[in-house]
Amino acid sequence: MTPSSPASVAASPPASRGLFISFEGIDGAGKSSHIQGLHDAFVAAGRQVVSTREPGGTPLAEKLRALFLQEPMDALTEALLVFAGRRDHLQQVIEPALARGDVVLCDRFTDATFAYQGAGRGFDLQVLSVLEHMVQARPELGQGVLRQPDLTIWFDLPTEVAAERLAGARAPDRFEAEPQQFFARVAAGYAERALAQPERFARIDSHQPKPAVWQAVREAVEAQGWLSASQVEG
């Protein structure tokens, strides 16, 4: 599966409603294998699945991602880049997939921007909110309605454990190289988002053994009625 391009899988039942699930957490939280697990479970259930990521997901957004992760810049530039990529991602990938009735699994979305640029960098949350409303507006559904995930699975992990997981891995990008204090602020930002929108967030304790984390992910999806227990065994 290539995160920057839609997955090719079995056709979705025509009557299926599109589903948008995002996956959040600090670097090292362990999202990737569980995204793949849910991808496989939805495919086995006969759904068409698009697995993607942010920043990225389109040719343009992937170019912006490379700049975002490697080039030095201030928090406003980071925010503008990530929201520009998000706009293209929504128009080119996410909205068309949801209109087809596909399941969209996205490794990070807007919650990451509020956590990393807002809480982590200390950037103005009101400015981020303005950008969010510009980029994610759904005027066909009414003023102030935004495109948000149907479910956000938040992998919560102590920052010191995340640092241990990242140590000795590939050369870190400029976010992975940040100190633990930065990630503590990011984690607090995620917690604040989850507290403000509990109906959308499912918190997963990702300091558990991997099978227990997967079970918690399964239960979060089962609770929505989107998959049965037998379809998410892994």
Image (tube, rainbow, N blue to C red):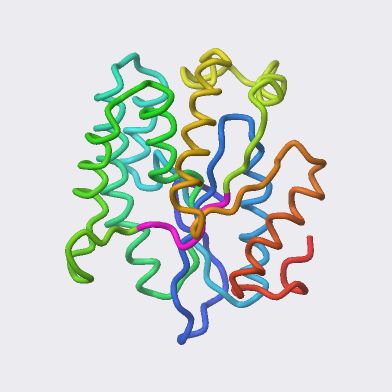
Read off the magenta span.
148-153
Q: Quadrant of the C terminus?
A: bottom right
Q: Identify which residue is drawn at 42% across, 24% down.
A: 69
Q: Identify which residue is drawn at 55% across, 23% down.
A: 184
How many callouts does the rendering have? 0
Q: Nearer the viewer, residue 217 or 142?
A: 142
Q: Identify which residue is drawn at 64% across, 69% down.
A: 223
Image coordinates for residue 140, horizontal then vertical, percent: 19, 70
Q: Identify which residue is drawn at 65% across, 73% down.
A: 227
Relative placement, left or right, of 215 versus 3 is right
Image coordinates for residue 48, horizontal then vertical, percent: 52, 71
Image coordinates for residue 116, horizontal then vertical, percent: 43, 29
Position above or below: 111 against 1? above
Position above or below: 158 against 223? above
Q: Nearer the viewer, residue 126 or 85?
A: 126
182 within the magenta span: no
Image coordinates for residue 95, horizontal then vertical, percent: 33, 63
Position above or below: 2 against 13? above
Relative placement, left or right, of 125 versus 26 is left
Residue lying furthest bottom: 15
Relative placement, left or right, of 225 versus 136 is right
